[in-house]
Image (cartoon, rainbow, N blue to C red):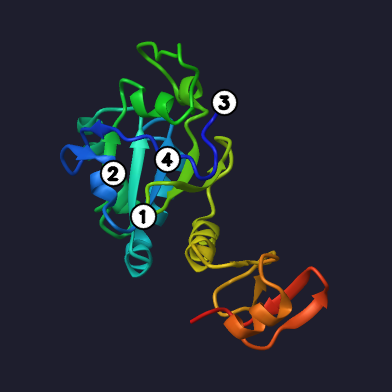
Amino acid sequence: MGLRINDTAPNFTADSTAGTIELHSWIGGGYAILFSHPKDFTPVCTTEFGAVARLASEFEKRNTKVMGVSVDSVEDHQKWKRDIEAFAGAPANFPIIDDTSLTVAKLYDMLPADAYLPDGRTPAHSATVRTVFIIGPDKKIRLTMTYPMSVGRNFAEILRALDAVQATDGVPIATPANWVPGQDVIVGLSLDDAAAEAKFGALDVKLPYLRFAKAPS
């Protein structure tokens, strides 16, 4: 069975472009995004790493660290970073870990346990390593998204999802479809109307089970 929402993110220690990293210690008291790639020097992944480089300040505002995973070596990552930075016009200062052993890819259920990568491998050999994990300060997995190789990830949506995760973390609310910060939220069914109004103020009741309120500040 694969990793599920609210599972503890498997811990690991790996070499990276920022030195040796132990995941849980590196996350510290904030949030983290782990986003994985099948191989260095691939076109879609280069655009994605470039997008992350450009969004560095947005992740910092959200107290969120970002880590890339690729099944190549740190030496290759350092060379690839030059291409990423040239394409993005921004420094790629987030760590990219060495997963040539497939330890992380297997730990996070992105490849079969008996998988191996032959010499001369192509991205197709590790095509399933295309997943995003949002991890909370308690090291629990809050959200996962998996993409095929042909579809570049939408980092505006990843930021939006991160905002929604942070807005609802530990609060009896949920976000409706297409929610963005500043919009009303859905009040949890664990609160009756009186308790909900006491906590969130006036309610906009659309249906007995669908009640909106201003997002907590």
10 Å crowding of disc 3: few (<14), some (14-19), many (20+): few
* Residue 128 image position (x, y, % from top left): 52, 28
Which element carries disc 1, helix, strand or loop? loop
Q: Which residue in the protein does label 2 denote?
A: 24
Residue drawn at the location 54% of the way across and 59% of the way down? 161
Q: How far apart are marks 3 and 2 (CA)?
A: 22 Å
Q: Residue furthest left?
A: 19
Task: Identify the mark nearer the N-term, 2 or 1.
Answer: 2
Q: 179 or 86, which is in the foreground?
A: 179
Task: Identify the mark nearer the N-term, 1 or 3.
Answer: 3
Task: Identify the mark nearer the N-term, 3 or 2.
Answer: 3
| Residue 182 relative to residue 98: left or right | right
Residue drawn at the location 53% of the way across and 79% of the way down? 216
In terms of image quadrants, where is residue 178?
bottom right
* Residue 197 image position (x, y, % from top left): 66, 84
Q: Which residue in the protein does label 4 denote?
A: 8
Q: Distance between the residues labelled 2 and 1?
A: 9 Å
| Residue 95 relative to residue 197: left or right | left
Which element carries disc 4, helix, strand or loop? loop
Q: Which residue in the protein does label 3 denote?
A: 1
Q: Which residue lies furthest to the right in this view?
A: 207
Q: How far apart are marks 1 and 3 (CA)?
A: 24 Å
Amino acid identity at mark 4: Thr
